C-alpha cells in the first residue's frame, strides 16, 4: 500500500491514478491511499480494502475504453480533506483486493442541481438495451424535508456522468425520506420487469421503472418493509429474493450502531419474512441478524452493502462500509463519519439456505481473496 501527499499543486502519476484537483493553496494537504497493481500473489486480503472513505458503496465489473476489465466502485459524497469534497468518488480494481482512486462522478459544476443536497448512496447499473452506464443517486441534506432520487448516465463506468434529473422525491412519491434507491431487473421474456426500491426509516417501497429510459415510473408503488430499514439491496438466488436492509444510525461516530439484517421472499414484491416467519413490513421490526459491529475486532457500524458478486470459483462476496474504532471518526472538519470500504465472503447455510458472514462481524484477519480468471 502506498500513500501520496497532495499539496498546493496538481500531481498526476501516469497509469497509477487519475486525479482532477484544482490547485488551491487554501486547501489542506490531502492524503490519498491506493495500492500497487495486482499481482499473482494477491490471493489474500485484509480489511479495509480501501480508505479513507467509500461509504454506501456500489460496484460493477465492466470493460473500459481499451477493452480491459475492471471493477469500479462508487461511494457517497464526503470531505476527504478540508476544502476537498469528493462528489461520488470512484475507485477501481482488477481483483477486488487492490483499489486505486480514479476520480469523481461529478464535479462542482456537473453536480445534479435539481435539489440542493449531497449526492449520497449511489448505485451503478449498465443497461443492456443501450450499453450505457446509469448512476442512480440520492440527493439530500441531513433532515431534508423533500429529498429525492435522480439518475445520471455515461458511456463509460469512469464517467463523465451527465445528469438526467429527478426520478422521484418525497412530494411526488408520497413517501417520507425518499432516498437510498436500488434498481433491479428480474424475470425473462414477457415476465421481465425492472423495479426501483427506495426508502429510509419511513418504509421501504418499490415501483416498476422503464428499463429503456431508466427513469419513467410505471403503475403504482408498493411497500415491502416497515420503518426499520434503509439502504435496500435485493439479491436473487435460486428463485428466492434476499432482502438486505441497514438499521440503526450510520454516522454517529463512536456511538454508531449501524448493522445489517436479512429477510427472504419468493416474489420480488414480497412478503419478505425473517427466519421466524415474521413479515418485515411491520413497523419497528427488523429482519434476521446478518452483520453487526464488534469494537474488539476494530470495526463498528457495518452496513449499506453493495452488490453481492460470485467469483470464478463459485464463492460469494459482499462490499460494505464500516467505522474503524482505531482512527479518527472524521477525516476532517465538515465531513461525515469516516467509513472505509470492507469486504467479506457471504456463505449459505447448507440446511436452511440462509446467507451469513463468518462470525456475523467484519473480519480483521487475512482472508482468501476472490478469484477471477481475467
Image: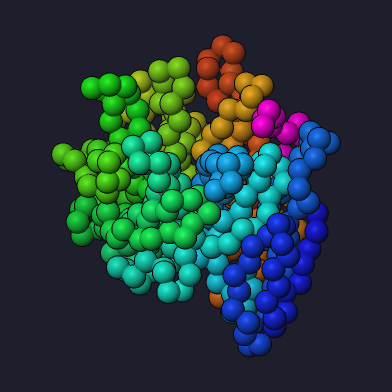
Residue 75 in magenta stretch: no
**Position of residue 224 in the picture relative to residue 291 (left or right):** left
The x, y position of residue 242, in whole percent, is 44, 28
**Position of residue 140 in the picture relative to residue 247 (left or right):** left
Instruction: Name which residue lies at 76% across and 72% down.
Output: 5
Quarter of the image for the N terminus: give it. Answer: bottom right
Secondary structure mainly formed by the magenta segment = loop
Residue 267 visible? The answer is: no
The x, y position of residue 228, in whole percent, is 40, 44
Residue 92 visible? The answer is: yes
**Position of residue 38 in the picture relative to residue 53 (left or right):** right
Return the residue found at the far front. 66
Instruction: Name which residue lies at 40% across and 41% down.
Output: 131
Residue 362 in magenta stretch: yes
Return the residue found at the far top. 351
Give the vertical position of 35 relative to 372 (above or below).
below
Residue toward you, 123 or 324: 123
Which segment is the magenta one?
361-374
Residue toward you, 243 or 38: 38
Instruction: Name which residue lies at 68% across and 28% down.
Output: 373
Toward which corner of the image does residue 4 lie, by quadrant? bottom right
Instruction: Name which residue lies at 30% across and 35% down.
Output: 194
The x, y position of residue 168, in whole percent, is 26, 54
The x, y position of residue 118, in whole percent, is 43, 67
Amino acid at each position: 500500500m502506498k500513500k501520496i501527499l497532495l499539496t498546493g499543486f496538481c500531481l498526476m502519476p501516469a497509469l497509477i491514478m487519475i486525479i482532477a484537483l484544482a490547485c488551491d493553496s487554501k486547501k489542506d494537504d490531502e492524503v490519498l491511499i491506493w495500492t500497487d497493481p495486482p499481482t499473482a500473489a494477491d490471493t489474500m486480503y485484509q480489511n479495509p480494502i480501501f480508505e479513507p472513505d467509500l461509504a454506501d458503496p456500489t460496484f460493477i465489473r465492466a470493460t473500459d475504453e481499451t477493452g480491459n476489465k475492471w471493477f469500479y466502485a462508487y461511494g457517497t459524497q464526503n470531505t476527504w480533506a478540508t476544502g476537498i469534497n469528493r462528489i461520488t468518488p470512484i475507485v477501481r480494481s482488477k481483483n477486488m483486493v487492490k483499489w486505486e482512486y480514479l476520480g469523481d462522478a461529478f464535479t462542482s459544476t456537473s453536480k445534479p442541481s435539481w435539489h440542493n443536497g449531497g449526492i449520497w448512496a449511489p448505485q451503478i447499473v449498465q443497461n443492456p438495451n443501450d450499453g450505457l452506464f446509469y448512476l442512480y443517486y440520492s440527493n439530500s441534506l441531513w433532515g431534508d424535508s423533500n429529498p429525492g432520487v435522480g439518475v445520471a448516465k455515461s458511456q463509460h463506468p469512469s464517467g463523465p456522468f451527465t445528469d438526467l434529473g429527478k426520478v422521484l422525491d418525497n412530494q411526488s412519491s408520497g413517501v417520507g425520506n425518499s432516498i437510498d434507491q436500488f434498481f433491479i431487473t428480474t424475470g425473462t421474456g414477457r415476465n421481465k420487469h425492472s423495479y426501483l426500491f427506495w426508502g429510509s426509516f419511513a418504509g421501504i417501497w418499490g415501483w416498476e421503472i422503464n428499463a429503456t429510459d431508466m427513469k419513467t415510473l410505471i403503475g403504482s408503488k408498493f411497500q415491502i418493509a416497515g420503518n426499520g430499514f434503509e439502504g435496500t439491496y435485493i439479491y436473487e438466488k435460486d428463485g428466492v429474493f434476499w432482502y438486505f436492509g441497514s438499521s440503526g444510525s450510520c454516522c454517529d461516530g463512536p456511538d454508531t450502531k449501524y448493522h445489517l439484517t436479512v429477510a427472504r421472499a419468493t416474489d420480488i414484491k414480497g412478503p419478505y419474512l425473517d427466519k421466524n416467519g415474521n413479515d418485515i413490513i411491520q413497523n419497528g421490526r427488523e429482519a434476521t441478524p446478518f452483520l453487526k459491529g464488534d469494537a474488539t475486532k476494530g470495526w463498528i457500524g457495518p452496513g449499506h452493502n453493495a452488490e453481492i458478486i460470485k467469483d470464478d470459483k463459485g464463492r460469494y462476496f459482499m462490499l460494505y462500509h464500516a467505522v474503524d474504532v482505531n482512527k479518527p471518526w472524521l477525516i476532517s472538519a465538515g465531513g461525515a463519519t469516516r467509513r472505509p470500504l470492507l469486504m467479506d465472503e457471504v456463505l449459505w447455510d447448507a440446511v436452511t439456505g440462509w446467507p451469513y458472514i463468518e462470525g456475523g462481524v467484519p473480519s480483521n484477519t487475512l482472508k482468501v481473496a476472490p478469484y477471477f480468471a481475467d
